[in-house]
Image (cartoon, rainbow, N blue to C red):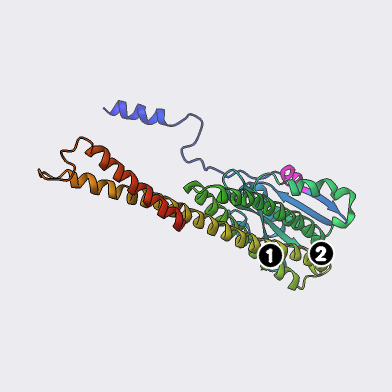
Amino acid sequence: MTTVKNSSTVSAVSPGIPPSAPITAPTATPQDVQAALYGEHNGFRWYHVADPAGPVLDELAKMVDLHELAVEDCRTPDTRAKIDEYGDTLFLVANLVRFDAQQDECSFSEMDFFLRDKLLISVCDGPNPFVDQVRAIFPTQPKLASTGRLLHRLVDAMVDNYLPVLDAIESRIEILEDKAIEHTSTKLLTEIFAIKRSLIEFRRVTISMRDMLSQVLRRNEHYLQLEAVYFRDVYDHLMRALEFTETYRDILTGVLEVHLTAAANRTNDIVKVMTLFATITLPILLITGYYGMNFENLPLLHNPNGVWIASAIMAALVAGLLYAFKRTGWF
C-alpha cells in the first residue's frame, strides 16, 4: 500500500519542474509596443491596440501611466459612449453601429481613446477598417499628427457609417410596407417589432454619442478647442441621424397600424362570409327540421312531389336572402 502511494505521488510530478512553480502572465516585448505605434510625427505619437485583453495595453498603461479604471473600461464590452477625466488624460468611448438585414438586428461596438497633448492611444477589439484607412493616409497628411485632428478623423469615420445603417433600415421598412398592404401574417408582425427594436437601439447609441460630443465641445483642452468646428460638424451629423430615426419610427408605427387594420378587415370579411352562410342555411335547417318531426299529418308528407316542392321553397328562400343581402351591400 505504501509503495503504490509513493509511486503515484512521484508520477504526478513532472521531472525537472518544481511543484510550486509560479505561472507568469504573458508580457509585451518592446517589439510588440513598437508595432502598436501606428504613427509618429513632430513628437506626436499614435498607438493602436487591437486586443484590449492583451499585454500590449498593460505595457502602454505602465509606460504612459494610464488609470486602471480606464483600462478596465477598455476591457468591458458594450460600453456606451462617454468621456471621463483622469488627471491630464481624457478617456473617451465612441460607438460604432452595425445592422444585420438578415436578422433585422442592430448592434454596436466600441472604440476607446486615451487623449493627451501629443499622444493618442486608440483601443478596439479586432480589426477596424476606419483605423486602417486613417493609418494609410497618416504619413502623407502631417495635420493628422495632432490629438484633436486625429480623434476627429476617427470619430467622424465612425459617425459617417450611421447614415448607411439608417438607409438599410429604411429599405427594410419599405419592404415591410409592401407586405403590410398585400397580406398579413404573424411573421410580418415579428419583423415589424424587430425593426422597431433596432431603431430603439440605434437611437440609444446615437443619443449617447451626441452627449459625448457635447461634452467634448465644452472641454477646455487646447487640442480639442482647436478642432471644435470639426467636432460640431460631427455633432450635426448625429442630430440628422436622430431626426431620421424619429421619422422612421413614425413610418414604422404607421406600417404597424396598417398591418393591424388589414388584419382586422380580413377578420371582418371572414366573419361576414360565415354570417352569410349561416343566415342562408337557417331557412333550410328550419324546413328540414320541420319535416323531420315524427308526425303523420304533415303538409306534403304523402305527396309524391313533396320533396321537389320543399326543395323549391328552400331554393326560393335562399335566392330571396341573397337578393336582400345584395341590395343592402353585404357582398
Does any portion of residue 58 appear in the rendered image? no
- In front of the other: 145 or 303: 303
Queried whether the magenta region covers residue 264, the answer comes back as no
Decide: few, some or many residues near mark 1? Use Cα within 10 Å; few <14, some 14-19, many ≥20.
few
| Image x and y of residue 156, in percent | 76, 57
| Image x and y of residue 189, in percent | 50, 51
Q: How many marks?
A: 2
- In front of the other: 186 or 86: 186
Which amino acid type is shown beneath numbered disc 1?
A: Glu
| Image x and y of residue 132, in percent | 77, 45
Q: Circle 2 sits in a helix, a strand or a loop, which is it?
A: helix
Residue 151 found in image quarter: bottom right
Queried whether the magenta region covers residue 35, the answer comes back as yes
Q: Is residue 267 left or right of residue 149?
A: left
Residue plotted at (79% across, 47% down): 133
- In front of the other: 248 or 301: 301
Instruction: Check disc 2 and report the residue beneath it.
Output: 230
Decide: few, some or many residues near mark 2? Use Cα within 10 Å; few <14, some 14-19, many ≥20.
some
Residue plotted at (89% across, 52% down): 141
The range drawn in magenta is 30-37
Residues at marks 1 and 2, CA–CA distance in whole angstroms: 20 Å
Determine which of the numbered discs, if any, sits on residue 243 in the image. 1
Q: Earlier in the sequence, mark 1 or mark 2?
A: 2
Mark 1 or 2: in front is: 1
Main structural element of the magenta stretch: helix, strand or loop?
Answer: helix
Residue plotted at (72% across, 63% down): 240
Query: Looking at the figure, which quarter contains the N terminus?
Result: top left
Q: Circle 1 sits in a helix, a strand or a loop, which is it?
A: helix
Which amino acid type is shown beneath numbered disc 2?
A: Tyr
Q: Is residue 158 left or right of residue 283?
A: right
Does any portion of residue 207 appear in the rendered image? yes
| Image x and y of residue 198, in percent | 58, 55
